[in-house]
Amino acid sequence: MDIQTITAADIDRMQAADPRTADRSMLKDIRDVNVDTGLPKKERMLDFIRQIGNPYCYRHGDYVVKVSFADTDATLEERMMSYMRAKC
């Protein structure tokens, strides 16, 4: 897939990936991703996607990670703080 021409159908397919049935050997390990922080924002995003393949489903070592987003105005930082408060 050419990251310059990712379609809505490509994004839907990536989001629909099931971590329970994903072929681990085909998933990229996020620990191998190194994005050049000196690049402009758009170029960093493209570089990340080029390296990780599917940003919604990837590996971290032996673990398959599935990322999804809720339709909300809450930020990741707010959710993390809420989680930390609940656990402490």
Image (spheres, rainbow, N blue to C red):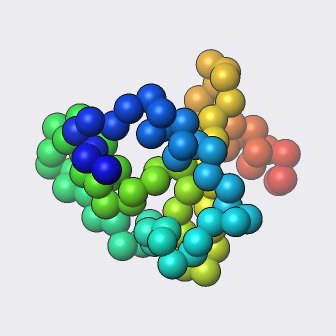
Q: Is residue 61 above or below residue 5?
A: below
Residue 8 pos. (x, y %): 45, 29
Residue 59 placed where, x, y %?
54, 69
Q: Is 39 situated above or below 8? A: below
Q: In this orientation, which residue lies closer to the viewer: 80 or 52?
A: 52
Does residue 44 appear left or right of residue 80 in this picture? left
Residue at (76%, 45%) from the top-left corner? 83
* Above or below: residue 74 compared with residue 34: above
- Can the viewer see residue 9 in this picture? yes
Using the rendered view, name the quadrant where residue 86 is placed.
Answer: top right
- Res 41 seen here: no
Where does the image place residue 74, in percent across and percent down from the top left?
64, 25
Residue at (52, 46) in percent of width and height: 14
Residue at horizontal 63 percent and vertical 35 percent from the top? 69
The spot of residue 88 in percent (x, y) is 82, 53
Q: In the picture provided, is 53 more to the left or to the right than 68?
A: left
